[in-house]
Amino acid sequence: MKPFAERGDTPYTAVLTRHYGVDVTDISQQGCRFHGRELLAIGDVGVLSATIGGQLYAELFRVSRSHMLPGLSILCEAGVEFLPIPSGGRFLRDIASRIDGAHAAPLRRVSRAPQKPRRAKTDAS
């Protein structure tokens, strides 16, 4: 196979994704807060998805704050703002009023075994 740079066809655009398991601890129509094992960089964008009542919901977000929780060396907290969305589809903000403190447990997705948090690389690092 020829190296990509030597091929005559048009290059393709792709998206590189990473999956993180998080616990959503607070949610509103503007954004949410979640805990996870990875420290996210402020300004990062992503997609938060959850299955609720058998329905898949997703939300585009931008990280507005992120820090390691004091005394909990393996847990990080991020505050995110939801980004503008296209019409149609199932979005978490649409059901945020039904996801409140009345639930016994936060939204949860089981992930891999606990690891030490990794610091996100930023321009200042």
Image (cartoon, helix red, strand yellow):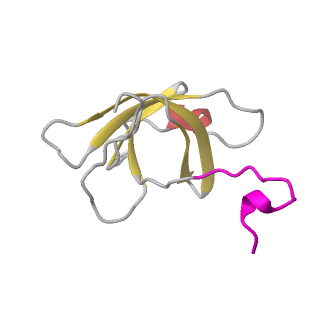
Q: Which residues are magenta?
A: 1-16
x and y percentages locating residue 38 in the rendered image: 35, 47
Taking 1 as reference, is 31 left or right? left
Can residue 107 be seen here? The reply is no
Can residue 57 be seen here? The reply is yes
Looking at the image, residue 91 lies above or below residue 6:
above
Residue at the spot 76% in from the left edge and 70% down from the top edge:
2
Predominant SS of the magenta segment: loop
Front residue of 112 and 51: 112
Front residue of 105 and 65: 65
Residue at the spot 55% in from the left edge and 34% down from the top edge:
61
Looking at the image, residue 14 lies above or below residue 119:
below
x and y percentages locating residue 51 in the rendered image: 55, 54
Front residue of 116 and 25: 116
Residue at the spot 12% in from the left edge and 40% down from the top edge:
71
Which residue is the extreme one toward the front?
A: 6
Which image quarter holds the N terminus? bottom right
Which image quarter holds the C terminus? top left
x and y percentages locating residue 13 in the rendered image: 74, 49
